[in-house]
């Protein structure tokens, strides 16, 4: 075999070995880890306090109405969902006996007033007669004894007049007492509102609640023109709150929509319920009356009270932060690099990056994925841009 053939065979063998080595390397080398990254940008970062359990939309005024007396329902004048005005009669119990007693009191007042007119007219006549008798005495026509008799009679008649007037006032007071008894059988709306619940039907017997025992109200009335959210806050976070702080309200019934609110009340005590964390109840007002027009009392709600905020500061997603204020940065060479950063304000969405990162640095947010660690090769996944506040 000549030398050129041997050389040609050697080159072919070398080429085959090179190809096999290349395939082996490409097949056995570790593949880059796919990671989700977010670039450091500038924007608003807030420190917020949120409720620990779901709160609820509550009416500023809600009354569970029932008559103070027990009795049979004679008239039921509203249904659930009806809108009523303050002073409107809602329920009336059977009260014919009390109404009759009131009519008797009215008649007695009329009789007492007639007696007043009669007694006072007689008293006035006796007074004028005493005056005439004194004039006759001054002229010597009657004795002093006759004058004394006339004046005594005038005083007695005047006393009778005053007694009749007192009896008339007593009769008027009896009317007031009778009307008060009658009013205890009538339930009226204490304010404008909507009837949320009616318990009872005409002919049924209503029983007032004994002390310490709750019974269903005859009428549940809600003023739905004024609403707020009541929610529990962890006792650790409650110390940061102050009346007047702004915040956001979210409702399960209106997903994706935020309502602006303002902190109106912080309970002056801590709730310590068994098997639950100690909490403080807070109340947040809706700032825009137009937004609450169609809300329903009892909606499940969450609140976020803004304790502090900074605008136009460097920030990263909070999901990129590891214990010890560390992050993984995907550098230009496609390698994950661990950095310790200085953080500022933070909430569940964003954390302020005060130092250790530059604008545009890409931090990893998919820390839970296998193989995501410092020194690993990585490739960024495409991720839809999120809406920034």
Image: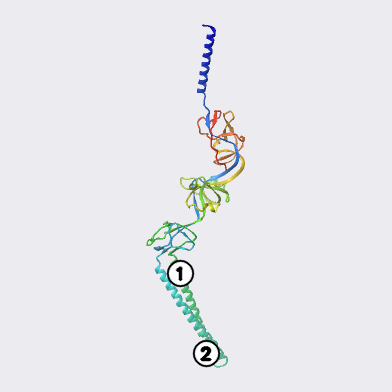
Answer with the quarter of the image where residue 346 lies: top right
Furthest toward the bottom, the residue is: 141
Q: Position of residue 77 (x, y in %)?
A: 43, 62
Q: Is 73 above or below relative to 292?
A: below
Q: Is 276 above or below relative to 152?
A: above
Q: Name the residue rendered at 48%, 74% in the picture.
A: 169
Q: Is 10 above or below relative to 284?
A: above
Which residue is identified by label 2? Answer: 146
State the residue in front, 93 or 69. Answer: 93
In the structure shown, which secondary structural element does the residue marked by tag 1 occupy?
A: helix
Q: Position of residue 313 (x, y in %)?
A: 62, 40
Q: Position of residue 177 (x, y in %)?
A: 45, 69
Q: Nearer the viewer, mark 1 or mark 2?
A: 1
Question: Coloured how?
Answer: rainbow
Q: What is the quadrant of the C terminus in the image?
A: top right
Earlier in the chain: of badge 1 and badge 2, it is 2
Residue 40 is tagged as none
State the residue in front, 127 or 80. Answer: 80
In the structure shown, which secondary structural element does the residue marked by tag 2 occupy?
A: helix
Measured in 3D between alpha carbons, the distance from the residue under mark 1 to the one under mark 2, in whole angstroms, is 47 Å
Q: Position of residue 57 (x, y in %)?
A: 49, 51
Q: Is residue 228 left or right of residue 66?
A: right
Task: Check whether the beta carbons of the residues at disc 1 and disc 2 lie within 8 A of each other.
Answer: no
Q: Is residue 149 left or right of residue 74?
A: right
State the residue in front, 314 or 278. Answer: 314
Q: Is 21 above or below relative to 328?
A: above
Residue 254 visible from this viewpoint: yes
Q: Name the residue rendered at 59%, 32% in the picture.
A: 339
State the residue in front, 284 or 162. Answer: 284
Tag 2: Cα neighbours inside 10 Å, few (<14), some, or many (≥20)?
Answer: some
Which residue is identified by label 1? Answer: 177
């Amino acid at each position: 075999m000549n030398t050129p053939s041997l050389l040609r065979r050697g080159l072919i063998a070398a080429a085959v070995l090179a190809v096999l080595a290349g395939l082996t390397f490409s097949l056995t080398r570790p593949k880059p880890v796919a990671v989700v990254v977010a670039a450091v940008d500038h924007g608003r970062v807030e420190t917020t306090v949120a409720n620990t359990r779901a709160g609820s939309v509550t009416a500023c005024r809600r009354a569970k109405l029932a008559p103070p007396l027990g009795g049979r329902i004679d008239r039921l004048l509203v249904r659930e969902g009806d809108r009523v005005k303050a002073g409107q009669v809602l329920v009336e119990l059977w009260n014919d006996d009390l109404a009759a007693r009131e009519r008797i009191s009215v008649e007695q007042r009329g009789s007492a007033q007639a007696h007043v007119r009669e007694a006072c007219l007689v008293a006035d006549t006796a007074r004028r007669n005493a005056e005439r008798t004194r004039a006759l005495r001054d002229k010597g026509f009657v004795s002093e004894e006759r004058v004394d008799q006339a004046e005594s009679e005038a005083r007695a008649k005047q006393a009778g007049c005053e007694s009749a007037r007192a009896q008339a006032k007593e009769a008027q007071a009896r009317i007031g007492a009778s009307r008060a008894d009658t009013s205890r059988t009538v339930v009226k709306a204490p304010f404008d509102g909507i009837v949320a619940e009616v318990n009872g039907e005409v002919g049924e017997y209503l029983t007032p609640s004994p002390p310490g025992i709750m019974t269903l109200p005859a009428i549940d009335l809600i003023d739905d023109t004024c609403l707020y959210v009541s929610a529990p806050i962890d006792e650790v976070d409650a110390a940061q709150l102050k009346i007047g702080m702004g915040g956001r309200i979210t409702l399960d019934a209106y997903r994706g929509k935020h309502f602006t609110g303002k902190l109106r009340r912080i309970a002056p005590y801590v709730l310590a319920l068994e098997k639950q964390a100690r909490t403080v109840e807070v109340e947040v007002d809706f700032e825009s009356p137009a937004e609450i027009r169609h809300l329903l009392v009892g909606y499940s709600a969450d609140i976020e009270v803004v304790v502090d905020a900074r605008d136009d500061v460097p920030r990263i997603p909070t999901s990129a932060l590891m214990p010890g204020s560390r992050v993984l940065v995907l550098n230009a060479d496609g390698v994950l690099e661990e950095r310790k950063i200085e953080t500022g304000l933070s909430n569940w969405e964003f954390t302020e990056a005060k130092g250790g990162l530059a604008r545009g640095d890409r931090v990893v947010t998919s820390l839970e994925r296998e193989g995501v660690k410092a020194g690993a090769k990585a490739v960024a996944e495409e991720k839809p841009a999120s809406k920034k506040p």
